[in-house]
């Protein structure tokens, strides 16, 4: 049994080590919200909102997350007792998945700590070693891109994900492939194309890509199905997937062959585990995408990625790829292309937060 006594919302900014550019925006710093839930025994559980300060990835922002937690989610768990994290009654609130995840993840952390088990074991993970890949944003020059790829490969990352957009795709892949004929490469378009580009997109098949992530609009299952029909390269849906119903639609319509899973996108572990199992039953592999998480979100994403149907290297890699100083100790390290999660209770890391705006809800 867990009785939730108090919630502290910690909010602070973390500058990214290097700006990251995708087809729609450049990110230089992240507005981080960490939720700390305190139970009757005085234990703390931590969750993270992975939202950005602007709604370019999904409709949520850090401001909407803060309001949703304070006005709508906290009242549903305040001073309540739960025997399991799956019992928290968030189904009465539509969507707002990143806000829900910030709370839900903290309840799972508390639950695992109470059970004195690592979170990854509590959710059914079978290994604490997770293969990871590196994502590289759009670069000012192809030379710089090749240098960054070389670095990431030298650091052991098992595959490279390249951001692309119209005008920065085929010639870039041509160069990349001639330098790295055998490296596992995938691309992510963040919805930069439309079905009018179908003849252009078919040429991607020449580059032996593991997958092409979210080529078309975030809400377009039908066009993705038309494209997948004509494409050998597997399509992976990212921005399109928020619910089990989205996954069922994508599988029914054959809109993709792979699904990118992110805790924040689907509203937390309980939904993520259901979607994971459903995909496994339908022979659709999933993998763990990244959201420039600080340590809490990073540890939780990686815990999720220990489930057996996570079949490709994960995006969240070493803390030091993103941050000068992460908020957990030890920081996340990559060795031999893998992260190994500590066998400690809950998320398994100590949380050390910088000075921040704090809102205490009681
Ligand atoms: O470096 C990473 O962890 C992946 C970066 C990334 O691709 C990404 C980062 C933030 C939001 C959305 C996405 C995405 O997968 O589209
Ligand atoms: Mg993506």
Image (cartoon, grey):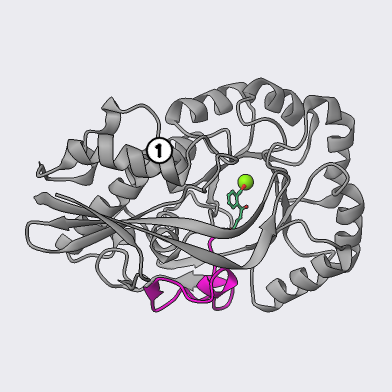
Report whether residue 295 is seen: yes
Which residue does the image show at 75% across and 37% down from the upper left?
Answer: 192
Residue closest to the eye, 354 or 195 = 354
Which residue does the image show at 88% across and 40% down from the upper left?
Answer: 203
Vertical comparison of 130 with 280: above or below: below
Q: Classify mark 1 as within 8 Å of ligand 1 or not, answering yes or no.
A: no
Residue 323 at x, y = what percent? 53, 71
Residue closest to the eye, 195 or 273 = 195
Q: Which residue is mark 1?
A: 97
Residue 353 at x, y = what percent? 35, 70
Q: Main secondary structure of the magenta part?
A: loop
Residue 243 at x, y = what percent? 44, 31
Q: Specify few, some or many for label 1: CA neighbours under 10 Å numbering under 14, 14-19, or 20 or more.
A: many
Name the element at disc 1. Answer: helix
Q: Residue 327 in magenta?
A: yes
Left or right of residue 290, residue 24 in this image: right
Q: Which residues are magenta?
A: 314-338
Residue closest to the eye, 302 or 94 = 94
Question: Quadrant of the rendered structure where residue 143 is?
Answer: bottom right
Residue 35 at x, y = what percent? 30, 55
Q: Residue 319 in magenta?
A: yes
Vertical comparison of 353 with 111: above or below: below
Which residue does the image show at 31% across and 69% down from the upper left?
Answer: 348
Report whether residue 272 is seen: no
């Amino acid at each position: 049994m867990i009785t939730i006594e108090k919630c502290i919302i910690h909010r602070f900014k973390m500058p990214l080590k290097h700006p990251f550019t995708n087809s729609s925006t450049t990110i230089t710093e992240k507005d981080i919200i960490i939720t700390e839930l305190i139970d009757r025994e005085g234990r703390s559980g931590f969750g993270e909102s992975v939202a950005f300060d602007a709604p370019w990835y999904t409709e949520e922002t850090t401001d909407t997350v803060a309001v949703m937690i304070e006005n709508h989610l906290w009242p549903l768990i305040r001073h309540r007792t739960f025997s399991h994290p799956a019992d928290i009654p968030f189904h009465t609130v539509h969507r707002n998945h990143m806000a829900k995840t910030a709370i839900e993840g903290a309840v799972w952390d508390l639950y695992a700590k109470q059970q004195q088990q690592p979170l990854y074991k509590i959710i059914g993970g079978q290994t604490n070693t997770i293969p990871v890949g590196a994502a590289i944003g759009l670069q000012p020059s192809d030379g710089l891109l090749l240098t960054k790829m070389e670095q990431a490969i030298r650091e052991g990352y098992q595959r490279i994900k390249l951001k692309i957009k119209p005008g920065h795709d085929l010639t870039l892949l041509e160069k990349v492939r001639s330098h790295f004929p055998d490296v596992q490469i995938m691309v992510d378009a963040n919805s930069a194309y439309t079905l009018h580009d179908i003849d252009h997109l078919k040429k991607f098949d020449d580059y032996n890509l593991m997958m092409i992530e979210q080529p078309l609009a975030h809400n377009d299952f039908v066009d993705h199905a038309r494209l997948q029909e004509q494409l050998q390269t597997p399509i992976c849906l990212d921005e399109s997937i928020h619910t089990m119903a989205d996954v069922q639609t994508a599988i029914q319509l054959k809109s993709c062959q792979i699904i990118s899973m992110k805790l924040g996108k689907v509203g937390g572990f309980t939904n993520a585990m259901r979607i994971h199992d459903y995909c496994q039953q339908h022979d659709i592999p999933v993998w763990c995408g990244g959201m420039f998480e600080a340590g809490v979100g990073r540890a939780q994403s990686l815990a999720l990625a220990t489930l057996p149907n996570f079949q490709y290297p994960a995006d969240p890699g070493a803390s030091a790829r993103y941050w000068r100083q992460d908020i957990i100790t030890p920081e996340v390290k990559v060795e031999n292309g893998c992260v190994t999660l500590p066998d400690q209770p809950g998320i398994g890391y100590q949380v050390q937060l910088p000075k921040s705006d704090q809102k205490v809800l009681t």
